[in-house]
Amino acid sequence: MNARLEAYLIDLRKHQQMFPELLARLHEVAAGERWREVVELAEQVLAAAPQHAEARTLRSRAWKALEPATITQAPPVQEPDPGPLDPLPPRSFLWIDGVGGYMVCLGNRLTFGQALPEARVDVPLVADVSRLHATVTRDGEGYVLEAVRPIQVNGANATRALLQSGDRVTLGASCQFLFRLPVPGNMTARLELVSGHRLPTSVEGVLLMAETIVIGPGTQTHVSVADLKEDLVLFRHKDGLGLRHHGPMRVNGQKSSGRAILPPSATVTGEEIGFAIEPAI
């Protein structure tokens, strides 16, 4: 067995054995509004049960409660001028009823940095990171991470790395995200902040969209929705996003016959799911 996979399975079994105790402690610290401990314990619970709704809800509450403490107002003069950045690629928010929100990024090259008014980055982070901290580029090899300021990949310092599914990337001292390619043969990646930091608009994760985004009931999906019986697929087209689906659905109140081109702002409703798309300004 691959040593990395074996280590992951051992860690997963350890978390599952500790699950009842972790969940009890999570309830205890949430009742006492000890929000930093809530974030830490919620992450441990979600490591064993990634779709645990209560842990996800408590983690979101903790992030909101901690917001004033996590914002860093570093004077711009302390950072070197990164120079002109590329125009922001199309980005949208995907809001799924009962599940949460995701930022969908359509660019092949993405920038990561601190969420400041003058810093135009694709993925702005409410964290103690630089205005322009790192870039991720999707090419024929996969996803290449390049450092502008200090980064680590799986705890090791790095300046450039070809990311593998399951890698943990740390920007600066503590802002960490998990990189995943959850659908075999699909190059759309999912980033999950696992350090208690967040984007200015609180979302569950960032989807780096290649050709399609799979929304469905299984684990090999980009967004898991337990109530769905069959997968939905968001796909690229020349003007933005399209939708392929089974069963009756409506897009902005109009019936869809199984395939629809979505306007920049769209509300989609069906018997098993409801979601909305809106531009990220």
Image: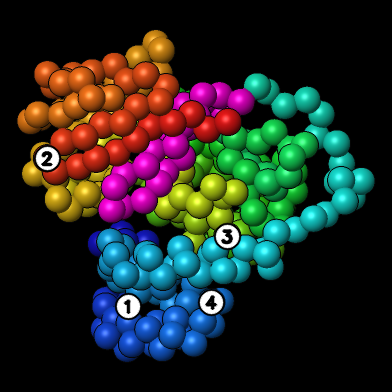
| Mark 2 vs mark 3, CA separation in Å | 34 Å
Q: As displayed, is residue 81 above or below residue 227?
A: above
First reached walking from the N terminus: tag 3 or tag 1: 1
| Mark 1 vs mark 2, CA separation in Å | 35 Å
x then y, percent, for residue 218: 17, 49
Say what amino acid the circle numbered 2 marks.
Glu
Q: Residue at x 66, y 57 (%)?
A: 127
Residue 15 tag number: 1
Say what amino acid the circle numbered 1 marks.
His
x then y, percent, for residue 158: 64, 51
Eye-nearest disc, 1 or 2: 2
First reached walking from the N terminus: tag 1 or tag 4: 1
Q: Mark 3 points at which residue?
A: 197
| Mark 3 vs mark 4, CA separation in Å | 13 Å
Label 3: how many Cα within 10 Å (few below 14, some 14–19, many 20+): many
| Mark 1 vs mark 4, CA separation in Å | 21 Å
Asked which secondary structure carries label 3, the reply is: loop
Q: Mark 4 points at which residue?
A: 35
Q: Is residue 113 left or right of residue 219?
A: right
Q: Which residue is drawn at 81% across and 29% down?
A: 83
First reached walking from the N terminus: tag 1 or tag 2: 1
Q: Give the range drawn in magenta.
A: 88-109
Q: As displayed, is residue 187 above or below residue 256?
A: below
